[in-house]
Image: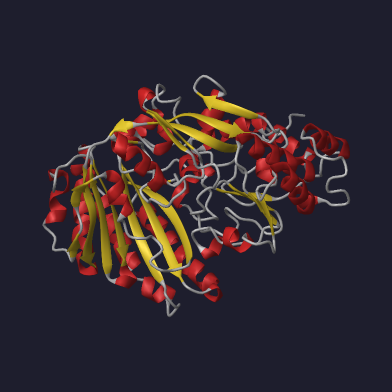
Amino acid sequence: MHLPRVLPLVLPLLAAAAPAPATELQSFLARHNLPADTAQGLTGAAAACEIGSQLLGGNSTVDKGDSGYETLRTRNWAATAWLTPSCIATPSTSAEVASLLHLFSLTSTKFALRSGGHQPAPGFASVDSGVLIDLQKLASIDPHPSTSTVTIGPGARWGAVYAALTPLNLTTVGGRVGDVGVGGLLVGGGLSYLSARYGLPCDNIVSTTVALTSGAVVTASTTSHSDLFWALKGGSSNLGIVTSYTLRTYPQSQIWGGLILYPLSAAPALLKAYDWYLHTGMADARANLMIQIAPLNDTVFLNIFYDGPNPRPAAFKPFFEIANVSDQTAVQSFSDMLAVAPSQSLGLTRWAWGTTTLAATAAASGAAWQDLLTLGTKAKTLFGDIPGRTVVLGFQPISAKTVDIGRAAGNGGGNALGLTREDQTWFVVNGGWLDAADDAAAYNATNAILEGAKTVAKQRGVGREFVFMNDAGGEQDVIGGYGRESLGRMRKVAARYDMRGVMQRLQNDGFKLGV
């Protein structure tokens, strides 16, 4: 009888369902010069918090009720992600992160991982009755101009990265929002205003340092653990925890760009201009933009960027013909542009989002954008009288050239995303509100718009399976959207580097491999 193909991948998870034998934990304590009776009589998270406190030393582990716990617990961007960990660990070295992962394996402790904490889904970047690993101390930014690289810790924020590189007339391919964390964006693939020139952020990783659940720390690159390196580029935290990234840097002079505000009545014309940009303006790889339509706020935001000091370039010509309310564009530094970008929170504390992909076909995509706008006008009915409610429809253009860069064998072996080579739009729905009492209604309303967008894409024949992790909702099957080949390959990598299935079995939520 033949075993099902997936069974060899599942067996390690079944074998790891219980805590490791006491002898393994004793060996762990001895190897780290901790007393044999450490956490004696304790199990699970209680044991992990006690051992972790001695392992990290100082004030690097904060227990529930301790001073500073509440500040750390609520460091996530959205209150929807705030949970109540048994303790919060703030390691400062790769070795400490690896030791914590090994400890969780031995004590069968639930845990979560947080770099910037920008994902709003409940259970992501936090955990109830487990251990939260906060990477804020791993936030170094070390430029290496002689090798055109920069080494960055996962706990750094993109605004700080750009600020460190700007005096050197350099930049890297990273996030478009300054307060987003480095770690989560890169292992999710990422999206940059520079992606049409240099690829997605994950395509610009030269090497990584990775903490594994065995307690080992390895370097993953094209020449060392290349299978792991490939899987990390879109694989989230399914393989281990990346504790540093080395990224390519590029010369960066001043840019032109900023925010232009329009009334909601301009949205149909703006989406026609957007379709023109997809098929004409986007040929200029220095040009990039993002449209955000907020129907409940009667506003459209155009975030516009040109990589060069060229005011009002021809790549955006139709947008300049539409009357606006406010134009904040200027020739400025890249970091200055991001520093004055409006806060994504809009003063709200609770958020949900989701995303889908639509191909930018000449025959059908223009009608699809207008259909999505019509869908957005239903938001007032869907959200009803929920206090503070808002919804933002985001249109993010992706060029076929961007996909080509990510696929290139010479570019680090490619990425794990499984993207189709075509111009496309990564459409995102963001729903925001104020009160926890309205969570269920607001989630349902946001999801209804997302499902409506998928229906539009299908009916117009432009729907695609890819789900952009950094904008995905907590219930979306992100890794499955990469395609069967990519998923199967990632599962094999996970079985090699996480033999006990710790990242699948004990990590709290997250976009997992489905084994």
Vertical arrangement, residue 359 with respect to residue 149, above or below: below
> Of all residues shown, which one is farthest toward the top?
223
Image quadrant occupied by the N terminus = top right
Residue 53, position as x, y percentages in the image: 72, 48
Vertical arrangement, residue 120 with respect to residue 195, above or below: below
Q: Decide if residue 38 is in sight here.
A: yes
Q: Nearer the viewer, residue 364 or 450?
A: 450
Vertical arrangement, residue 372 with respect to residue 378, above or below: above
At 44% from the left and 78% from the top, the residue drawn is 387
Lateral position of residue 200 relative to residue 137, left or right: left
Vertical arrangement, residue 108 with respect to residue 205, above or below: below
At 32% from the left and 44% from the top, the residue drawn is 424
Q: Nearer the viewer, residue 331 or 505?
A: 331
Residue 160, position as x, y percentages in the image: 40, 46
Q: Quadrant of residue 264?
A: bottom left
At 31% from the left and 34% from the top, the residue drawn is 168
Residue 32, position as x, y percentages in the image: 76, 35
Residue 185, position as x, y percentages in the image: 46, 44
